[in-house]
Amino acid sequence: MFDHRKYRPFPAIQLQDRTWPDKQITTAPDWCSVDLRDGNQALINPMSVEKKTELFQLLVKLGFKEIEVGFPAASLPDYEFMRKLIDEALIPDDVTIQVLVQAREELIKRTFESLRGAKRAVVHVYNSTSTVQREQVFGLDCDGITAIAVQGAKWLKEYAAQHPNTEWTFQYSPESFTGTEMDYAIEVCDAVIDVWQPQNGQQVVINLPSTVEMSTPNIFADQVEYFCRNLKGRQHVRICLHTHNDRGCAVAAAELGVMAGADRVEGTLMGNGERTGNMDIITMGMNLYSQGVDPKLDFSNIPEIIATVEHCNELPVPARHPWAGELVYTAFSGSHQDAIRKSMAYHADRQLPHWEVAYLPIDPMDIGREYDAVVRINSQSGKGGVALVLERDYNIELPKWMHIELSKVVQKATEQTGQEITPAAIKTLYDESFVDVEQPWVVSGYNIHTDADRVTAQVRTADAAFEGQGAGAIEALCAALSKAHQCEIKVQHFDEYALGEGTTAQARACVALDVDGEHCCAVAVASDTSAAPLQAILSAFSRSQISAQAAAA
């Protein structure tokens, strides 16, 4: 039964003088990828040693300086991977590996065995501290849970001393931190810190996991600020966050948690992880990037990252994934396409120092996306988007009135198929509808004479010759066609553009005619500024004749 009354709201933190709402993130936190451990344990098919190696190398390439590589005491593949990294010297000097272990001596002992020979490592020990876990899983009071944590901290110190050539960092997590009373979470962490004594030089990380996301991000931020304020050894430790996405707010919670005082963030690429996933480092990192903050990670080749992650995780990256998804920079809506087209032109013309383009929060090129994916055309698209495709892919710039004409043709085609249309298909429709002309209507020669304010135009095709007079060559040719075919012709629109510079530059002419009430348009490209409009007039007129013949039939 779907009954909301079986649940109750998460209690707020009484923090009346909170400071995090006035903070702004100006530098990236320390990042730690947990793809190879937390992410791996959530896969349908856990990664092989080969795939873990491939993903590890990607993480190094992206710039991660701390990487959690596994739980070597819990599985043979993790242990073997650990040994491969060390024995084959695959860990760069500036990268610190991290491993996870429960607060149990036999597991801690094997963990240190797996790390034998490492130059630098973080050993991450944890035990559950939440009210629910204490009461329902372990059947222990707070003192009993604290004793487990303290003993685990002692074992880490003891076994680390047996390997003095490795630079050790100790990390402790009160698992299910968000479901733990804040004063008790502080108490148990203080007890662990007392064992490790970071004030004397031992590097320590205290990790605050939102093992299951239970509240809105602002409450999590209050928890973090309260914890940071009241932890006795705060100045000697790094505070780390490990948020999950059960409420869909893992990134927001991590961002607010950093504003509340955290120094470090754990997460995975694309947010892979148990249930709804871990905090997505790409999303948070790109959020910073879009605000002018260096994320200290290189996401310039998102397609490569996606390909590797999908191969190693055997899970697809959604097309609407924030920042990285295939469609996140793509506009199908006509109004969006028109705004993007105009905004990008405005940006380019004025050489603006900062990116400010409608509907595009960042420049897609920054992360390896091509502009050909920004505008895609379907039945929902408008004239601006269709015109942008021709400009972008074929360097065909049309006057605004032609945008409407072209859009009508493309819209009809997409409505008939119900499918997206490719740029190549748009170009074909453009050619067939406006450029292509039957041979009898192709200009084979012309002469233009000016006498006072009158122009005489003589235009020849393979099958006919036309001669007329007017204020200009276009008017003269229209007069000749009107006389020859006993019709009335009005020029509704005319535009001409030079395609390049110099004496060899071609010209493009666009014309719209009304021939006895029949609307017809054409585009012509020719080697000079006189031939192009004459061909455009003949091409447009030929279309009116074809329409008239079809109607008569």
Image (spheres, rainbow, N blue to C red):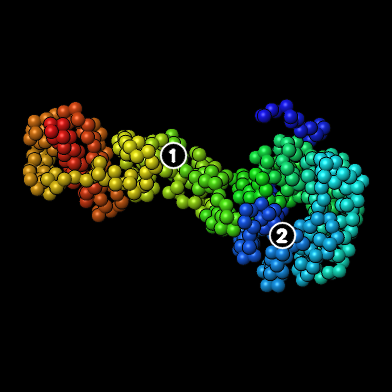
Q: Position of residue 463 (x, y in %)?
A: 7, 45
Q: Residue at x 86, y 56 (%)?
A: 152
The picture quadrant where one finds residue 3 is: top right
Q: Is the residue marked by circle 1 packed among few (<14), some (14-19), or many (20+) residues within 10 Å?
A: some
Q: Residue at x 66, y 55 (%)?
A: 40
Inspect this view and state whether residue 249 appears. Answer: no
Q: Residue at x 79, y 47 (%)?
A: 175
Question: Residue 7, relative to residue 317: is it above or below?
Answer: above
Give the SS element for disc 2: strand
Q: Is residue 167 left or right of residue 86?
A: right
The picture quadrant where one finds residue 465 is: top left
* Amino acid tagged 1: Phe
* Amino acid tagged 2: Gly
Give the SS element for disc 1: loop
Give the mark toward the camera: 2 or 1: 2
Q: Residue at x 69, y 64 (%)?
A: 77
- Residue at image mark 2: 70
Tally the marks. 2
Q: Is residue 198 left or right of residue 388?
A: right
Q: CA distance from mark 2 to mark 1?
A: 43 Å
Q: Position of residue 382 (x, y in %)?
A: 39, 36
Q: Is the residue marked by circle 2 packed among few (<14), some (14-19), or many (20+) residues within 10 Å?
A: many
Q: Position of residue 241 (x, y in %)?
A: 74, 47
Q: Position of residue 19 (x, y in %)?
A: 77, 37
Q: Nearer the viewer, residue 304 or 150?
A: 150
Tag of residue 332: 1
